[in-house]
Amino acid sequence: MSTTTEDLLRERRRAGIPKTRRTAVYVYQAPLRVWHWVNALSITVLAITGWFIANPPPSVMGEASDHYVMGYIRFFHFAAAYVFAVGFLFRIYWAFAGNRYAMQLFTLPVWRRSFWRELWHEVRWYAFQEKEPWKYYGHNPLAHLFMVVIITVGGLVMMVTGFALYSEQAGAGSWQDRLFGWVIPLVGQSQDVRLWHHWGMWVIVVFVMLHVYTAIREDVMSRQSLISTMISGWRMFKDDRP
Amino acid sequence: MPRSTPETFYEVMRRQGITRRSFLKFCSLTATALGLAPSFAGKIAHAMETKPRTPVIWLHGLECTCCSESFIRSAHPLVSDVVLSMISLDYDDVLMASAGHQAESILSEIKEKYKGNYILAVEGNPPLNQDGMSCIVGGRPFVEQLKEMAADCKAIVSWGSCASWGCVQAARPNPTRATPVDKVILDKPIIKVPGCPPIAEVMTGVLTYMLTFERIPPLDRQGRPAMFYGQRIHDKCYRRPHFDAGQFVESWDDEAARKGYCLYKMGCKGPTTYNACSTVRWNNGVSFPIQSGHGCIGCSEDGFWDKGSFYQHVTNVHAFGIEANADKVGLAAVGVVGAAIGGHAAYSAYTAIKKHPETMENRTDSSAGDQQ
């Protein structure tokens, strides 16, 4: 049986028509999406300014009153920190006010056997041991674990240590001191709190790298949309198989 | 000299040859140093004239005596003489005239006579390993003397970083298990006056407050007098404007160093150190480390010997025998993770192409991903 050019063209045309019904689910509501991007921006500003607080830019010459380099760097750090903190509080509120997926950041179903099984499957998928990943409306278990550990727990550690350090300049009796001042003797001394805060920055920077990479990779290679979901809110599925 | 009524502070001072004028000066100076209103000068004077003298016992454990050296150099010699007279009257084995059994008998005498009413000042700390044998006072481990004298005291003043935190003898690996006083004596109020040594005026100020007001000065969360340890060196540093401006000494003897810029990059621990050096200063208010061009080493902070170099402010971490700081480890982690991501991405692309070769050969076939 010979194939003509006509046949090939027809075959190609047919292939171009979607044969499957593509489904989509509305996962991330608008306030949550706004929070995500505001949070991303504040973390970026915090990491950059935080780096410069620990390692200031080259010294400037001239009158001290002509410059305010460290002043501005610190101002942006504190401003971004307040944005992050207020955003975090909003995110807690939204866990209750939002849809079912909004709670994921604060709950980790470690008691469920299926969680660990699916987590293992996801690890195997990343280790090229599985042909394809499973589909999820919200986070896959591996992403879920990382989100809770880094963004929720890590974010809390950064806020607690951060406000403890802020209380040093706000002074004894300030609300920062009353709420977070206990952290300093608990950790050791001021310098130890700085060290933990500094380590936390590196953990978050590494997380951001992994987060961006996996988001792009999953968007390309998994069976569902990732990046556009955090923009439009809709999770698209590329196939109809379970 | 038997007396029906105990001596007051004022009487002791007059007996030491202090004029009334000097006495009043001392009172107003103390009120100012403690951050009190001018009216308190009169109250201090009144208290010192009427209240019976509270005995102070000054014990020495594992230490270098720099606290005592600092103390006797109090900015106003007259003042230090006064306080010193009050103290040496009772017990301080490096300053008192008596020695041996004669000196030791004073301790038991005070302990009985002023039960629950004397102040115990402790310079240094007790080592607990080897049954406390690393510090012997009067033929016995210091920890025994400390516990014995602490049992009947009103309050304890922990002089210096040794008594407050442990200091150099407690630095890693702390072979003698030198232990700060508050970890050994748990049932008495303890005032920590850290520093290596503490500032003389801070020491006399704290003692005067306690002796005149018969109460402990307001303390911060870590048990330090809030009036002297409420702020960091950095908060009151005269070089702070250079920090805010971003003007730093980059290396010793550079132009910035000559201009007196901020020593932050040279590892100054001012931002993490609570002390009064940048306000009270040292040696009659002449200077303090930063003013003389060297960064603060954080000597009044817990474990300052174990926080890495005095010349860098990011603490070194001793892990697996490799000395590294957070930035080096962080940058290395970013490099490793970045490389891993690159490799993973490349291999991902490779497997994808292997699995669906048609996606590369037939780019118009948009549904390739659905056909497997």
Image: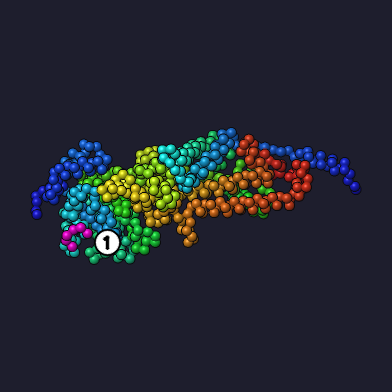
The image quadrant that residue B316 belongs to is bottom left
For residue A156, side relative to residue A224 (left or right): left
**Position of residue B305 measured from the top left corner of the image (x, y, whole percent):** 38, 56
Q: Position of residue B91 (x, y in %)?
A: 19, 56
Image quadrant where residue A224 sits: top right
Q: Is residue A105 left or right of residue B85?
A: right
| Badge 1: residue crowd in 10 Å (few <14, some 14–19, many ≥20) | many
Q: Who's the residue at 26% across and 42% down the image?
A: B34
Residue that label 1 marks: B142
- Residue B97 highlighted magenta (yes or no): yes
* Point 40% across, 49% down: residue: B257
* Closer-to-camera residue (B226/B111): B226
In this rendering, is residue B111 above or below B47?
Answer: below
Q: Which residues are magenta?
A: B94-99
Return the x and y of residue B100 as percentages of the image width and height.
18, 64
- Say whether residue A230 is visible: yes
